[in-house]
Image (cartoon, rainbow, N blue to C red):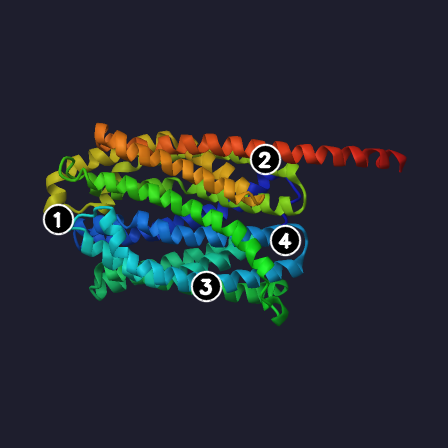
């Protein structure tokens, strides 16, 4: 366990974020392995089909991530207040709510897979690959929920290092199962999805066993499992806006993808380039994801301890790290673009790749250049959004997602029609800037109001201190 309410924020946030960053990278890598192996053993249509499931995956699994992250904030706040009984009750309630979430989301997501793909206008060449991959992933939603929650519990109490080891183990297992299922058993895209589900489930089980063994203070008693509508409502009040924020962002990505799919005939190779380039983009952006996770836990603990001054300092520290991550992200995307793209494209087994190879590379390079040049705006979202979530203002974070959605819809329906693929490339940065403006204004209004409440309390305490 790690108390983030004491010590140098620069050091605390960095040391917390680094293991999370490495874990995020490994998670992206084993997601990339699915795509790479499918692209090199089946064909480019399979690669594109599996890749096009990203926004729908994000819609459902992002909702899961938002809920479990919200529950983790509640645990972090109790931990920051040094209330271990409250921590255990919050953990038990999180698990009970996760069971309900799993049942409901599985029942909703599986039948919605095909209609959502139709909404995005996924081409018939790609549809079977996309649908079958999503079908297996959605049947395994429970594995994702369980892993996210167990890892979130550890992070909430300041342990970001051990979830990394479990994630690395899951990544290695996922790669091994990919080779067994895809290449050995010839299960192709079904195998890629099944490998992901199994590896996440086993990682979640290992994480849970670790919590029980290494953190006896978190072992739940029968009294902890008592249902409380007040406690459940508090969890939902923080988790649901965070979940909706993810899903709202996903809807914007789906509309963006829909616009891209409409360019299939006029921009041959654009869809394949987009799928491959977004994998590289996602990998480069993981430093911001890690910083956001660190800020949520750091802010949650300090808010629970009543140290809002440290929350303010944490946001400033986070922005310094975002500036550094932006520079590194540009260097990564531009410096390694061609060798990374070659991992996804196999001209020897797919004549379409050979025919449009130069076009695919050109589209992908343009996309990554524009995205990486604007990483500072993306990183700013993670800092201010997660700081707001950490102090319990999840609704404001969700509203930032609504602003982002509106901006992305505007670009999808206006700029893409005018500029074609270039409009797709600029849709994310425009949405990021709009979201930044809202979140920063919201954050400073909230913090100003908190500071005004703190000032009278400090003035009341000063005479007492002087008298003493």
Q: Looking at the image, tell me whether mark 3 or mark 2 is earlier in sequence order.
A: 3
Label 3 to label 2: alpha-carbon separation? 33 Å
* Contact (Cβ within 8 Å) of mark 3 with mark 4: no
Q: Which residue is mark 2?
A: 446
User: In the image, is residue 31 above or below residue 409?
Assistant: below
Q: Nearer the viewer, residue 100 or 144?
A: 100
Q: Nearer the viewer, mark 1 or mark 2?
A: 2
Coordinates of residue 440 in the picture (x, y in percent) = 51, 31
Q: Which residue is mark 3?
A: 100
Label 1 to label 4: alpha-carbon separation? 54 Å
User: In the image, is residue 5 above or below residue 328?
Assistant: below
**Does residue 129 appear anywhere in the picture?**
yes
Label 3 sits on a secondary structure element that is: helix
Label 1 to label 2: alpha-carbon separation? 55 Å
Q: Which residue is mark 1?
A: 350
The residue shown at (50%, 46%) is 293
* Contact (Cβ within 8 Å) of mark 3 with mark 1: no
Q: Which residue is mark 4?
A: 79
Label 3 to label 1: alpha-carbon separation? 44 Å
Label 1: how many Cα within 10 Å (few below 14, some 14–19, many 20+): some
Label 4 sits on a secondary structure element that is: helix
Q: Nearer the viewer, residue 294 or 248?
A: 248
User: In the image, is residue 143 above or below residue 301?
Assistant: below
């Amino acid at each position: 366990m790690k108390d983030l309410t004491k010590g140098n924020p620069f050091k605390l946030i960095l040391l917390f974020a680094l293991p999370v960053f490495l874990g995020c990278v490994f998670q992206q890598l084993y997601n990339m392995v699915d795509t790479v192996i499918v692209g090199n053993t089946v064909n480019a249509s399979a690669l594109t089909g599996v890749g096009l499931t990203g926004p729908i995956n994000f819609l459902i699994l992002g909702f899961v991530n938002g809920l479990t992250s919200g529950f983790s904030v509640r645990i972090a706040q109790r931990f920051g207040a040094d209330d271990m009984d409250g921590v255990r009750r919050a953990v038990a309630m999180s698990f009970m709510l996760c069971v309900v979430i799993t049942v409901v989301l599985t029942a909703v997501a599986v039948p919605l897979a095909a209609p959502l793909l139709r909404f995005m206008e996924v081409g018939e060449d790609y549809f079977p690959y996309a649908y079958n991959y999503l079908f297996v992933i959605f049947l395994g939603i429970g594995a994702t929920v369980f892993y996210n929650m167990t890892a979130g519990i550890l992070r909430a109490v300041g342990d970001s290092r051990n979830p990394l080891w479990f994630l690395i183990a899951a990544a290695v297992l996922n790669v091994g199962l990919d080779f067994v299922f895809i290449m050995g058993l010839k299960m192709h895209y079904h195998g890629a999805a099944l490998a992901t589900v199994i590896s996440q489930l086993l990682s979640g089980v290992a994480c849970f066993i670790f919590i029980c063994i290494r953190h006896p203070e978190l072992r739940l008693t029968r009294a902890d499992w008592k249902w409380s509508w007040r406690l459940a409502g508090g969890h939902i009040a923080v988790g649901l806006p965070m979940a909706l924020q993810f899903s709202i962002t996903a809807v914007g990505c789906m509309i963006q993808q829909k616009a891209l799919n409409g360019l299939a005939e006029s921009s041959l190779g654009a869809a394949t380039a987009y799928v491959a380039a977004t994998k590289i983009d996602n990998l480069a952006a993981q430093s911001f994801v890690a910083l956001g996770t660190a800020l949520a836990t750091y802010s949650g603990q300090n808010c629970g301890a009543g140290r809002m001054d440290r929350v303010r300092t944490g946001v400033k520290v986070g922005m310094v790290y975002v500036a550094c991550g932006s520079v590194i992200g540009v260097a990564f995307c531009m410096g390694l673009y061609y060798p990374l793209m070659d991992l996804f494209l196999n001209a020897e087994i797919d004549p379409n790749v050979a025919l449009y190879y130069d076009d695919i590379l050109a589209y992908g390079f343009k996309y990554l250049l524009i995205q990486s040049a604007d990483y500072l705006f993306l990183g700013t979202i993670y800092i201010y959004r997660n700081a707001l979530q950490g102090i319990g203002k999840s609704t404001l974070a969700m509203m930032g997602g609504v602003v982002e959605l509106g901006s992305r819809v505007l670009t999808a329906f206006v700029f893409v029609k005018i500029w074609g693929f270039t409009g797709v490339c600029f849709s994310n940065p425009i949405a990021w800037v709009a979201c930044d403006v809202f979140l920063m204004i919201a954050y400073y209004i909230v913090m100003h109001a908190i500071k005004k409440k703190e000032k009278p309390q400090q003035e009341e305490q000063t005479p007492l201190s002087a008298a003493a």
